[in-house]
Amino acid sequence: MIGLHGIRTPIGVDVGSRIIKAVQLNVLRGRYRTAAISVVPRADAEKELSGQEIRELRRVLKRQGFQGRDIVLAAPDQSLLRGVFDLPRQVSGAPVAQIARMELSRMHQVQPDSFEMICWEPTAVGQSQSTMQAIAVGCPHETANAFLDQFDENGFDVCALDVRSAAAARACAPLILAPPAVTAILDLGWSATKLLIVCGGTVVYERLLANSSLSALVARLSEKFKIPGDSACQIISTMGLSAGADVQGLDEQTVAIIRRMSRGHFDGVLEGLQAPFAYVARQYPGEGVKRMVLIGGGASVAGVSKYLQECLRVEVATAAPSDILESASHLLAKADNPAVTVALGLAKFTGV
């Protein structure tokens, strides 16, 4: 769709367990600018996405300035088939994808023709001369079709189904260091925390960190002080790890407990980073992780970037849309939310 401010991209839609994030961009003379941003709470985080929720999302987006029905979705992470394979270096091109498909089907015990797959070869640093590495991600047809049909039947036209990790790397591209330097992207999500290692524009490593979701911290705080989850989430976001944050009239002992619980949570995240950071140091000798970029709702927790930077001794930056692209003045508040960064990456999908 073309207007005075350029061409509107499809809408990037990132469906989370708690909220749905949507971003649409303008493209003018090859430059992106945010055109519309929306964060829509889910009706029930414990239930599957419903047709009614999707229809309501359509109405909300229309009211909030989004244009058109075309969308790019992120495939449900929990349904994806993943694999990393060492292959003979003389194998290249189509045979790599064929071998990866067969290995992925064997690993997950599914039929080779039962899923769509993308496959790529990461930057060959620290690999032997005789072997190369291939990374493959597959999405089962049954899962993909059911997910796409939900949106197609309720007012949207789905242009593409992308992978969240690819969308995250695409969104954070302006903050990713030039190769051979290695950048980590830490997605501090509500239901999961995921680490991506990126060299240039290519994801070379992906890992889910156990027991480190933001929801787990909120649940512990909610139980400790017998307060609603939304209140606990607000307290963590505004107080978090920052000594100078607003304590919202809480007494000194309560503040100390909240900060101790928050620090303990992120200490667990740091522990989960030790093994992958050591792996990167071995695979990329002399490089290692030089910068870490934070996205997801947990990246908004007060003081978290400073705390992680001090502990890891690497540069840590937050990647909200406002840190990546120019935004209209009326969108600045929404653009300061790193929870919508993956949706921005989906909107930048160029295969449509």
Image: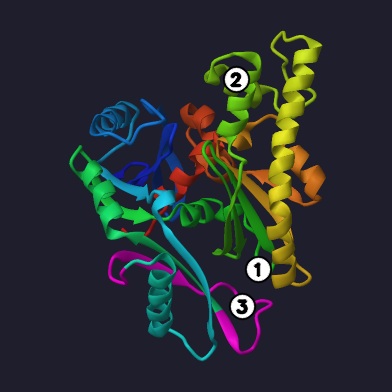
Q: CA distance from mark 1 to mark 2?
A: 43 Å
**Which residue is painted at 24% across and 34% down in the image?**
51
Q: Nearer the viewer, residue 143 or 205?
A: 143
Mark 1 or mark 2: whose residue is earlier in sequence: 1
Q: From the image, state whether disc 2 or disc 3 is nearer to you.
A: 2
Left or right placement of residue 315 versus residue 114 in this view: right
Q: CA distance from mark 2 to mark 3?
A: 46 Å
Label 2 environment density (alpha carbons within 10 Å; few <14, some 14–19, many ≥20) = some
Residue 9 seen in the current view = no
Query: Mark number for residue 179?
Result: 1
Classify 98 as above or below 168: below
Q: Are marks 2 and 3 in contact (CB under 8 Å)?
A: no
Left or right placement of residue 108 versus residue 183 in this view: left
Residue 328 seen in the current view = yes
Q: Nearer the viewer, residue 281 or 27?
A: 281
Q: Is residue 115 magenta?
A: yes
